[in-house]
Amino acid sequence: MIRTGAQYRDSLRDGRHVYVSGERVRDVTKHPTFKPLIDIRARFYDMQHDAATRDIMSYEDDGKRNAIIAKLPYSQGDWWDKRRATDTLLEEVGGIVTRVGDETLGEMWSLFDGQDVLNEVDPQFSANIRNHIAKVLQADPFHVSANTDPKGDRSKAPQDQDPDMLLHVVKETDAGIIVRGAKYETAAAYANQAFTKPTIANWANNALSDYAVGFICDLSSPNLKFICRTGFAGRASDDDYPLSNRFDEVDTLVIFDNVLIPWENVLFYRHTKAATYIRSTLHRYSAFAFIQRNIKLADLMIGAALFNARQTGVERQQAVQEKLAQLAVYRESINAHLTASIALAERSPGGLMMPNQSLLYTGRVLACSQLHEMMHIARELCGGQICVTPDGASFASAETGPWLEKFYTINENWVSGDRRKLLAFARDLLNSDYAGHRLTFQLFAQSPPYAHLGAVYRTFDWEGSLAFAHKAAGLSDKVFPNKPRKSSDKAYQQWASLNGQVR
């Protein structure tokens, strides 16, 4: 059954070893570094119960209420519901939070699709993934994902250096496996469980490896330590950094110091084929919610830039309109990819409905690779005052306030108070430490750019382009012996199949 915000907070008071700036945090729900995000995640839980949002955030199944974001997608309608739920969450809190579960639960669905691979290893692993997907619906945990290891010297195999640089199994017991190493994971310090899996690796010809392991980690397990980066919250006032103080998602190095993983939580072990499969399909579903955040980020940039243009009276200038149009094109291009990926959705090997893979992955490349350019356009539209404006305390001061009121008041509609708030918001969105962190996070959080392009290469319909060029150029069948007899436009075929059409 769906949890409440209070139940979520209580679940974090489990004695976990969390450290910030070298000091142990006794209660993450009250610590200023974590409290803003924990409060937001708690609000998301409560929205599943509130009358105004209950039917958007949850659904009824066999007399029980379950979270929409955790529902296995079997139809296009399921994806529209998930998209609406995520938009509702972000609009409710007035900002962007990435690690809240909807973008990480999909990684488990990818393994659900790979049950034939798991069965080759051990049929119990296939049963384990089904059980955990059901458990997520029943227990409603805050589920995150653990991918990246410290790695060490990448020119060496892990066993040729400190073996803990990559998470690995050190022992098998009747109760489960014992693992050592470390993983970086955003939000782990205030989450309940993590799908822990290998990073991108070159397994060469090895069929077996103690580093090829994937499991569900209960984040209250003994021998876990959470070493967190210093957060942005609390460094300065809310007036000056409204986003940094509310939406900083804290990244954590999770230390596995001989942690027991019960056998029922092990999803694959030792077989590199399973590890390779999950890395190649990991974002089959989760990329959707991840990219969806870029639309909301684009909305914030457009809003900040357009307000600045309007208040200073330059909105009608052609050069300004062209730059605003570039931001709109970026926003709508992402929107078009996500919308089309639902409209041309595909059946997965496990029978689920997955967003059209080529459209989804090309949308991710577009959203991530162009973000820095869009941020720079928004900076230009907001003007240089976002980096030179005094802080809120100066505006409130009896001595300096009157002068700032004089020079920051534009007209009767844009007085100094609103002008300062907008400039502070734009600075935090585009120029602050928080802004730089979000830009890097969006570039690397789901894998580095070369892996984004690799996913496009694996999912694009190359045969369709070859067939068209083959016919147009009048080439012989020798150069394309396996050409399709009819158009290989997978997108059309998927649409026709889903809509009961016959070509």
Image (cartoon, rainbow, N blue to C red):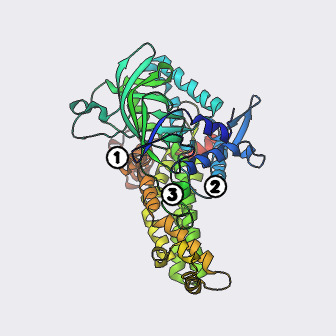
How busy is the neighbourhood of tag 3: few (under 14 within 10 Å), some, or many (20 plus)? some
**Residue 128 x/y as whole percent:** 52, 22
State how far apart marks 2 and 3 are (Cα). 18 Å
User: Does residue 21 sit above or below 191 in this rendering?
Assistant: below
* Quadrant in the rendering for residue 276: top left
**Residue 323 x/y as whole percent:** 50, 74
Identify the disc placed on residue 234.
3
State how far apart marks 2 and 1 are (Cα). 60 Å
Callout 2–callout 1 Cβ contact below 8 Å: no
Decide which of 490, 301 is in the foreground and name it.
Answer: 301
Q: Amino acid at mark 1?
A: Ser
Residue that numbered label 2 is attached to: 93
How busy is the neighbourhood of tag 2: few (under 14 within 10 Å), some, or many (20 plus)? some
- Mark 2 vs mark 3: in front: 3
State how far apart marks 1 and 3 are (Cα). 69 Å
Asked whether residue 500 appears in the rendered view, the answer is no
* Quadrant in the rendering for residue 421: bottom right
- Mark 2 vs mark 1: in front: 2
Q: Earlier in the sequence, mark 1 or mark 3?
A: 3
